Image (cartoon, rainbow, N blue to C red):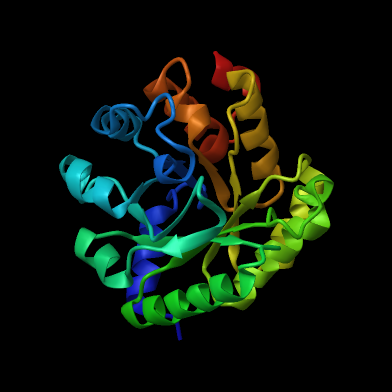
Amino acid sequence: MTALGKIARLARLRNPASGRIFTVALDHAPSYGVLEGLDYIQQAVDQVASGKPDAIMLMKGTAERCYQPYAGFSPLIMKSSTLSPYHPERDVWVSQVDDALRLGADAIAMAVTVGSVEQAQILADLASLVREAEGAGLPVIAHAYPNGGLVPPDKVYSAARVAYAARLAMELGVDIVKTFYTGSDETFAQVVEAAAPAMVVAAGGPRLEAEADAFQMAYDVVRTGAAGITFGRNIWQSSGTQKMIIAMKHVVHENGSVAEAVK
């Protein structure tokens, strides 16, 4: 039987009208450097929070220092692992379940680089996290990406590889899988089906050329039956963070069109 705490936390993450989840992630700096838009992290958190996404994803230190004004008002997902430019295939476990509970987080996230030479240890870490979180009634989100060095570059976004990564995470017991969008609603629907009964959300990925492209991606993801989408750079590197979030929620939760979102 699922713990009552997990049921309550998952409910807080999901929009009550659509049942979907639109998350904005600001956990990029340890992995990729201090990107434009994250130069002043408090300002970035404030701008994202003003748009009221369903959840915001932060590393522990950022949450401790920047999220206090929004505690209790906006769900928090704590990222518990990170890679870096110096170990690009190995997400190191840097925060624990008790850190997430102390911060009042509604979920804890860990990345899983599928196809990495480090995969054995990565899976062992994820299994340990799932076991610990289960005892605390805390939902686990796996960022399951088939982009390890053992995966051919032209296969990273293939439906078969992405579906396997998502299914692997589900089999280890995670509640939500965040993974690459495969490029079409037809192929991403295969990923959603492969990972069921875990919920699948699409990763927004690198900055797209036009904001309309981000809306189109969200529109297509919703059509697959996915649980939602997570954006980072396409939100806080946009021309207007708050307006972008509001428009994105129109697409994700209200089945709005791309043209409506752009307007």
The quarter of the image holding the C terminus is: top right
- Specify the quadrant that holds the N terminus: bottom left
Q: Nearer the viewer, residue 233 or 200?
A: 233
Task: Mark yes or no: residue 105 visible.
Answer: yes
Residue 197 visible at all: no
Specify whether 205 is left or right of 192: left
User: What's the residue at 16%, 45% (across, down)?
Assistant: 68
- Among the 4 quarters of the image, the one containing residue 144: bottom right
Q: Is residue 29 above or below residue 115?
A: above
| Residue 173 place in picture, x, y as percent | 55, 76
The image shows residue 14 at horizontal and vertical percentages of: 44, 53
**Residue at left 67%, top 52%?**
225
Residue drawn where x is 79% and y is 47% of the image: 153
Question: What x and y, as percent, mark residue 257?
Answer: 63, 26
Could you tell whether 41 is left or right of 139 in the image? left
Q: Is residue 75 left or right of residue 93?
A: left
